[in-house]
Image (cartoon, helix red, strand yellow):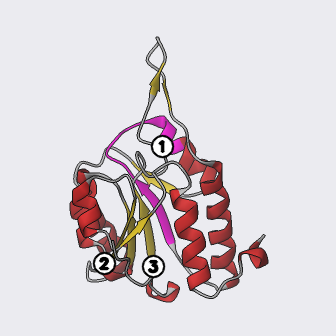
Amino acid sequence: MINKKLPYFRDIHTFIFDFDGVFTNNKVTLSVSGEEYIVCDRGDGLAFNLLKKFMKKNNWDLNIFILSKEKNKVVKTRAQKLSVDSYQGVDNKKDFIVNYLNNKFGNCSSSNGIIYFGNDINDYHAMQFSGFGVAPIDSHPLILDIADFIIKKKGGEGFIREFIEKFLIDNGESLLDLV
């Protein structure tokens, strides 16, 4: 496993996160009434705060959103808590990203500015299309084969935080200056 060098932050315009297996450990608890419960890592939330402070400090316009095949109110709730957009029930994530780029930038040639975070085979085409793919260590082998950067943490266990901290440090930021 050889990780590629992380991109310079000014070359990135969008972070796209899958939800299950990235924010979560890919497990769900069901109540008798059918309510779903999942666990997210609070440390990932702090990482989003650090990232947003870095964005403000550097006047960096970064688009951040969650893109999920699942349609579940827990995704929307977590996105709202993190103050990011979420798009759910998306069967073809690559097509969604192409349309997003066309609407946002006028063409889809700017996929090099995307960092895509995914873990399973429904992320494959979106990750392959994106400029830089990041995966947790417990991802599907097909995702691990195409990821540009593999974090040695499992999804839902601080994976996002570890990446964001490394990204900020590699871009010359002191984490203590952001708290």
Residue 4 within the magenta-colored segment of the rendering: no
The residue at which mark 3 appears reads as 13
Seen at 46% across and 61% down, the residue is 152
| Upstream in sequence: badge 2 or badge 1 | 1
Residue 94, visible in the rendered structure:
no
Residue 143 pos. (x, y %): 27, 60
Residue 81 pos. (x, y %): 63, 49
The residue at which mark 2 appears reads as 111
* Within-10-Å neighbours for mark 3: few <14, some 14–19, many 20+: some
Q: What kind of element bears circle 2?
A: helix
The mark found on residue 5 in the picture is none
Q: Which amino acid is tagged 1? A: Val
Seen at 37% across and 38% down, the residue is 71
Residue 53, visible in the rendered structure:
yes
Seen at 29% across and 74% down, the residue is 102
* Image: 14 above or below 46: below
* Image: 52 above or below 136: below
Q: Quadrant of the C terminus?
A: bottom right
**Picture quadrant of residue 103:** bottom left
The residue at which mark 1 appears reads as 75
Residue 154 pos. (x, y %): 46, 52
Residue extending furthest top?
Answer: 32
Q: Which amino acid is tagged 3? A: His
The stretch of residues the image draws in magenta is 63-76
